[in-house]
Amino acid sequence: MGRRDTRRQLILAAERLFADRGIEGVSLREINLAAGQRNTSAAHYHFGSKEALVDAIFEFRRPELGKRRDEWFDRLESEGRAADLRSLVEAFVTPLADEARSEDSQYLMFLAHLFLHTPGDVGEILRKHEAGEQRWSALVRAALSNIPAQLVMSRLWLMGRHVVISLAVYQRRGLGIGDQVGGFEVYLSNMIDAVTAYLSCPVSEATKTQVRAARASAGSTPPKDASGTG
């Protein structure tokens, strides 16, 4: 087995074990065994640490996801639909849904464990690998120009977590009670509808009040904006 094949086997084994038990619940030795490596130090030799293996999983999965999203964006732009929010959400969700259909990928559950069990670190981990999503988030911010950018980014973060965990649960358990009509395609389309509505819903008076209070507490003067939060 060549060096590249060894790295690939270690990455897939780490993804599978992290998906099952989380990063903290897995040792490099267990990853070696799951990858079928006789050399008990293979994972350490190739990656050095579990943190480096996490990075390697992102580097293994995200280029293909980014390529599929870029194909969506190119098509939307050529069709004049790059400002259509539902189409942008569909472009984000569909490549992840393809992962949920795959028997060879545990990437979604791996991400779900990051969201659920490493809340203090996951933002920094994702930012290290976000280049492929900058185009998408810029298009979404432009489509939601009536909502303050900081609130849009908060909604995008929550949206990403919701979509990943929902699709990971589907991949692991299938559709739940009440989601059977029409199967996965209806479930997915309904999710895209719901996420679109979530991102675009008006900023409530309660949230505007909280924004003003937070700005006042920080000693800043709230700027005027179209949403009236200023």
Image (cartoon, rainbow, N blue to C red):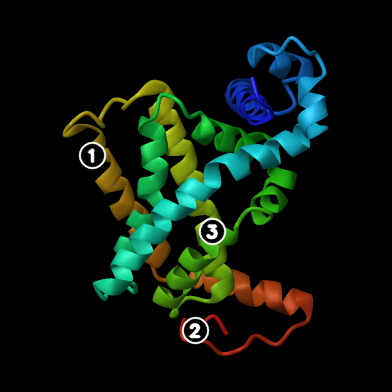
Quadrant (top left, top right, bottom left, bottom right) of the N terminus: top right
Residue mark closest to the camera, 3 vs 2 = 3
Label 3 environment density (alpha carbons within 10 Å; few <14, some 14–19, many ≥20)? some
Residue mark closest to the camera, 3 vs 1 = 3
The span from disc 3 to disc 2 (Cα, nearest Å) is 32 Å
Q: Please give the name of the residue rendered at 76% of the width and 38% of the height, measured from the top-left corner.
A: 52
**Quick one: 228 or 21, which is closer to the camera?**
21
**Could you say which disc has been placed on residue 185 in the image?**
1
Q: Is disc 2 in contact with disc 1, using a CB cutoff of under 8 Å?
A: no
**Could you say which disc has been placed on residue 132 in the image?**
3
Q: Is disc 3 in contact with disc 1, using a CB cutoff of under 8 Å?
A: no
Q: Please give the name of the residue rendered at 49% of the width and 84% of the height, measured from the top-left corner.
A: 228
The span from disc 3 to disc 1 (Cα, nearest Å) is 25 Å
Q: Position of residue 136 (x, y in %)?
A: 46, 64
Q: Position of residue 3 (x, y in %)?
A: 69, 28
**Could you say which disc has been placed on residue 148 in the image?**
none
Q: Earlier in the sequence, mark 2 or mark 1?
A: 1
> Can residue 81 be seen at all in this image of the molecule?
no
Amino acid type at mark 1: Glu
Element type at marker 3? helix
Q: Quadrant of residue 50?
A: top right
Amino acid type at mark 2: Gly
> Can residue 74 be seen at all in this image of the molecule?
yes
Q: Quadrant of residue 216?
A: bottom right
Q: Earlier in the sequence, mark 3 or mark 2?
A: 3
Residue beneath disc 2? 228
Label 2 environment density (alpha carbons within 10 Å; few <14, some 14–19, many ≥20)? few
